[in-house]
Image: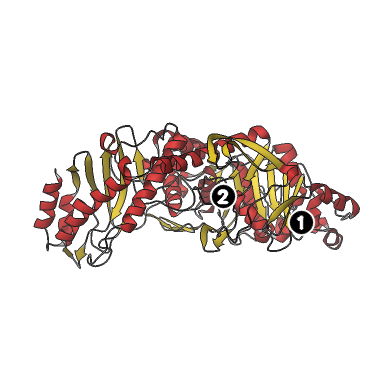
Amino acid sequence: MTGEELEGALLRIDGHGYKAYKAIAGCYALDDGLTLFVDHVQGDPFAAPSKLRVRVDAARARLPALGDTDVRRIAFEDYLARRVADAVERRPRGGRGSGRSGEMSIDAGGQIVLQRTSVVLTDDWVEARIYVGLPGDGRRVLGRQAAEILCRTLPRIALGALCADSFEEDAARRFVDCVDNQEGLREQLAARGLVAFVGDGAVLPRASGASDRPLDRERAVPFVTPEALRVALRLRNPLATDAGTVDELHGMAIPEGVTLIVGGGYHGKSTLLQALEHGVYPHVPGDGREQVVTRGDAVKVRAEDGRHVASVHIRPFICDLPLGRGTDEFSTDDASGSTSQAASIVEALEVGSRLLLLDEDTSATNFMVRDARMQALVSKRHEPITPFIDRVRELYERHGVSTVLVMGGCGDYLDVADHVILMRDYEPHDETQAARRVAAEHGTGRRSEAPAPMELPASRAPDARSFDASRGRREVKIDARGIDRIEFGTQSIDLRGIEQIRVTSQTRAIAHAIHLASKRFMGGGATLREIVDALDALFDREGLDLLDPYHAPGRHPGSFARPRRYEIAAVVNRLRTLRTRRPG
């Protein structure tokens, strides 16, 4: 059908009952090379907005060839989605009716760049997936306003945001090159024996505790690398500067092993760790952290009082609980700080992480250390916890697991550190040698309490029957409540302890990925590690559209952003109905 026919249909149903909008679902050629797909129509003006796609043929879009690799294509799609979001924000407003009438949105924005379903770029076309609240006055159709939105406003947005004539190619190229450079830096870390890199001039502080945007550069202290930790990494795409072309980036290396970040309160320790925690994702140009890259297997771990734990082998850290309670297959609906942190570490290692990030501020004190005086007062016979300090070196030396740890109050960790970075007035200083002198001159007298060598546990096999996404008459009822909660069937999953989920569309993707995995990958005793391996391979091969439980080829897939395997596994582990078994 044509755009004229769509407009005529909308005018004919003006004033009819709201369900008359159902008749407009379909495909419309709005203009030469411009197509509108109305995939799902909401039931009333107060319901979730309708799902629409606007597609521009490649011959009309004439976009530059910036997406010649997967990384660059994802970056270019992200850039285009941001342009659509800006155009949506600038569109003319006005009275559109009741409820969510006239609302318009696309999943885009924020400080990190992710693979999303909101814009898709192919050799033949570019498509934006948009949500639109079809206008209604109570339960009646406002057809004229709908015709204005669908036949005029949406085409202007699409042609203005998705066609090369409407934007500067240099700006798009700088955006894509910036993301590509970050992934190129990340790829060099393992070969250089590094877990992370922080470039000179990076701006790590955020504008506020409620904002992920950078602190104003006039107030921020740019990052300056200590000479002892300075390295240079190659850039995939050279940068043009006032001093000429730059093809490498200088900054601070964080080597493999055990690294402490120390210093006084409010001097930037946790700010640096948070930048490393978020450095598993590429950032937009101008964020300040686009020169901070962390190995992709980094997992931030914290204590989570009250979380669910299902059959986790926490014996390396906690054993011989009172009343004979075992910890080889530890389960609880109300974990303590220490048991939750032990479980989270084991769970991260189970699915492949070899880099742990910890902050003493969010850790259980008794899990982290037991000093000499407490050892003298409370016999090891009566202390089931083997503190992290007695495992952290073994994790690296026996299993290749590195740790970056913020520590401001316990000098005992100086004995086990390979590198010590002191933050003073927001500037890093390499104090490794000074820390070793202090450790040698001021012995703690504490004894290692590790009862036996630590072995990494075998991965558990989730029981598919644990994952019931139904609620009431709905076979699948899954909702993302921001980045902190998932409603999965009748279960509510608390995500506040999973700090590397950054956007709601990741939360939504995780929930649907778990549902998909329960149907496709959990038969035959597959382990959790094998399941997240299969999901990663599926996303690489087919993208994220298939996460929609009602997905059909060529339909709006909703708003999904790609999650990491570690966050998917972490959410599985917090589902209170989870049941597992050991394979074999």
Q: Quadrant of residue 168?
A: top left
Which one is closest to the eye, mark 1 or mark 2? 2
Who's the residue at 64% across and 43% down the image? 196
Residue 527 vs 277, above or below: the answer is above
Residue 525 vs 155, above or below: the answer is above
Who's the residue at 26% across and 34% down the image? 59
Who's the residue at 45% across and 50% down the image? 506
Q: Can I make out residue 454 in this image?
A: no
Mark 1: amino acid: Val
Q: Quadrant of residue 252?
A: top right
Looking at the picture, tell me which residue is in the foreground, 322 or 405: 405
Mark 2: amino acid: Arg
Residue marked by disc 2: 289
From the top left corner, tell me how far across and down residue 310 is, in percent.
57, 51
SS state under label 1: loop
Residue marked by disc 1: 369
Coloration of the structure image: secondary structure
What separation in Å lies between label 1 and label 2 (alpha carbons)?
32 Å
Circle 2 packing at 10 Å, graded few (<14), some (14-19), many (20+), is: many
SS state under label 2: loop
From the top left corner, tell me how far across and down residue 161 is, in percent.
32, 47
Who's the residue at 54% across and 59% down the image? 496
* Screen quadrant of the N terminus: top left
Looking at the picture, tell me which residue is in the foreground, 140 or 310: 140
